[in-house]
Image: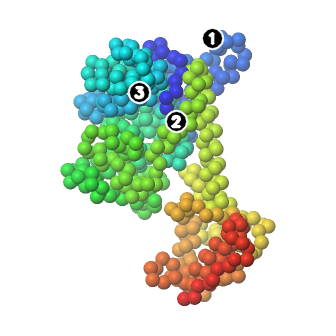
């Protein structure tokens, strides 16, 4: 994210020799709060005894409590100053001319004009003219190095890690220009690393992570690619004929892997390119890092969610960029906090309208329908009513649970909805070999027995009573939503 505070990188002192990159997140943000409070008691920032200045050894990102492994998180930006890289890392993470040009195009016209002057180029003309001159000159190694130092050697900027739904899980204010190291710091500070990471420089991040934690090799298999980088796999991927299914993205593994992610059960970790940057790489093996190769992700994941957040945040640059470093950080974290709250509440309301008012969170913070800890035995003799005043005509009762039609609505989000543990156990109970004539559910005046449900899931048969009940529910919802006149009914199926 390209907003910065006014502070010279050269003014930031290096850390002590024994500094290992670990920073206490809670202590840092508590100090930031004291800085803000202290300003109310002094005449100027220069007299604030609680002021926090940028330092390599006391500068922490923000990672939520449920996400981070501990209060001690990583910030190894001091390694950016002078660090020797291995031959493999140099070959993998060297900034290409295309990537440098992309960063150059993000700069404001004033920065570009100044860069033209420093490079001995004509600084007159439009922004496009200036960019064209710099792009042509970049082919020279000497000029490339000069532009690299000006663009990549700049200070600041924000690094964020987000869920595809738009929630920000981690945010870090960089003291020096963004690199894979910043995202590696964040990911290695997480309690559970995501199974799929989408990044605009995927190859560099995968290489850096594996070199940072070589004893564990966190990014595997195939160094984060979706398949072994054989020539046949590369050719198939280029032709669009290679598909790599990751079923645990939809349904948790029955037998989780050792050290597998608690939600998916898989211990695999892939680093893929977002759709906008997948064509930037010149390495043929990177075709195996495309989102479109995974059926569970293709067309379903918004890989540009971070860019969309940055576009929204641009309106704040005019005051954030003029702030002191501590003010900049404090304001940014507050803005992101309210952004997350608004997004979460909006999503929760939509889920409640789709699946009814009974939405809860499980131990991993996921929104679930019903009580995720509700066992079948507990549900058996308990009625759960969503709204006491709901008329009987708009009620659907299943296994003792009463569903309010007023809370239901049509939504594409329910198409891929995964049942909770409680719902799965209830389904198993309904399809069990117990009394076939037992009444299992009621929709309005229609009573459904266990034998009515036994054809569900079969290709060639569907019990007419089940279909009629579904249509009854649709009519009830339509009447409540005023989608249809109240006099319209549906014809019952005869089978």
Q: Which residue is mark 1?
A: 46
Task: Kindly report the distance in space between the C-alpha atoms of the residues bearing marks 2 and 3.
Answer: 22 Å
Q: Earlier in the sequence, mark 1 or mark 3?
A: 1
Q: Please, what secondary structure does the residue beneath circle 3 have?
A: helix
Q: Nearer the viewer, residue 478 or 257?
A: 478
Colour mode of the rendering: rainbow
Q: Please, what secondary structure does the residue beneath circle 1 have?
A: helix
Count of numbered badges drawn on the protein: 3
Q: Is residue 14 visible?
A: no
Q: Which residue is mark 2?
A: 310
Residue sitting at 40 percent across and 42 percent down? 276
Q: Earlier in the sequence, mark 2 or mark 3?
A: 3
Label 1 vs label 2, nearer the camera: 2
Q: Residues within 10 Å of mark 1 (few under 14, many from 20)?
A: few
User: In terms of image quadrants, where is residue 45?
Assistant: top right
Against 71, residue 35 (above or below) is above
- Residue 128: which numbered mark, if any? 3
Q: Residue furthest front?
A: 125
Disc 2 vs disc 3: Cβ atoms closer than 8 Å? Answer: no
Disc 1 vs disc 2: Cβ atoms closer than 8 Å? Answer: no
Task: Kindly report the distance in space between the C-alpha atoms of the residues bearing marks 1 and 2.
Answer: 32 Å
The image position of residue 260, as x and y in percent, is 41, 52
Q: Quadrant of the image for the C terminus?
A: bottom right
Residue sitting at 73 percent across and 77 percent down? 487
Residue sitting at 33 percent across and 36 percent down? 204
Is 443 left or right of 419, judged from the image as shown?
Answer: right
The image position of residue 432, as x and y in percent, is 53, 79
Q: Residue furthest right?
A: 389
Task: Kindly report the distance in space between the C-alpha atoms of the residues bearing marks 1 and 3.
Answer: 42 Å
User: In terms of image quadrants, where is residue 484?
Assistant: bottom right
């Amino acid at each position: 994210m390209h907003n910065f505070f006014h502070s010279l990188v050269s003014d930031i002192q290096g850390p002590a020799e024994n500094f290992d990159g670990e920073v206490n997140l809670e202590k840092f943000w508590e100090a930031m709060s004291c800085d803000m409070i202290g300003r109310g008691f002094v005449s100027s920032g220069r007299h604030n005894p609680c002021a926090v200045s940028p330092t390599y050894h006391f500068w922490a990102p923000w990672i939520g409590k449920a996400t981070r492994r501990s209060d001690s998180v990583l910030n190894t930006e001091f390694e950016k100053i002078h660090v020797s890289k291995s031959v493999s890392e140099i070959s993998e993470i060297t900034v290409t001319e295309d990537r440098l040009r992309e960063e150059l195009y993000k700069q404001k016209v004033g920065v570009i004009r100044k860069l033209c002057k420093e490079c001995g180029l004509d600084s007159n003309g439009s922004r496009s003219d200036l960019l064209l001159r710099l792009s042509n000159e970049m082919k020279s190694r000497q000029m490339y190095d000069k532009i690299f130092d000006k663009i990549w050697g700049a200070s600041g900027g924000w690094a964020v890690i987000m869920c595809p739904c738009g929630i920000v899980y981690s945010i870090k204010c960089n003291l020096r220009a963004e690199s894979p190291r910043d995202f590696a710091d964040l990911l290695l500070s997480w309690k559970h690393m995501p199974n799929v990471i989408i990044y605009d420089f995927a190859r560099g991040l995968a290489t850096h992570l594996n070199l940072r934690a070589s004893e564990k090799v966190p990014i595997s298999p195939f160094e984060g690619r979706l398949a072994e980088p054989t020539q046949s796999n590369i050719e198939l991927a280029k032709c669009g004929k290679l598909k790599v299914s990751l079923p645990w993205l939809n349904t948790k593994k029955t037998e989780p892997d050792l050290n597998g992610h608690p939600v998916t059960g898989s211990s695999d970790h892939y680093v893929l390119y977002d759709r906008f940057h997948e064509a930037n790489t010149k390495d043929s093996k990177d075709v195996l890092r495309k989102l479109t190769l995974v059926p569970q992700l293709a067309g379903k994941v918004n890989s540009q969610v971070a860019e969309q957040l940055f576009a929204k945040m641009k309106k704040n640059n005019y005051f954030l960029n003029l702030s002191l470093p501590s003010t900049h950080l404090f304001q940014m974290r507050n803005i992101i906090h309210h952004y997350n709250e608004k997004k979460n509440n909006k999503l929760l309301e939509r889920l409640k309208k789709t699946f009814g008012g009974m939405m809860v969170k499980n131990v991993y913070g996921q929104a679930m329908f019903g009580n995720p800890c509700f066992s079948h035995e507990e549900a058996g003799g308990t009625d759960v009513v969503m709204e006491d005043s709901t008329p009987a005509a708009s009620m659907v009762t299943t296994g003792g649970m009463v569903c309010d039609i007023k809370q239901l609505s049509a939504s594409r989000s329910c198409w891929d909805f995964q049942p909770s543990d409680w719902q799965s156990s209830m389904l198993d109970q309904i399809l069990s070999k117990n009394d076939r004539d037992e009444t299992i559910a009621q929709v309005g005046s229609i009573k459904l027995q266990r034998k009515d449900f036994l054809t569900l899931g079969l290709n060639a048969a569907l019990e007419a009573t089940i279909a009629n009940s579904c249509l009854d529910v649709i009519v009830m919802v339509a009447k409540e939503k005023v989608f249809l006149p109240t006099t319209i009914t549906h014809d019952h199926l005869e089978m």
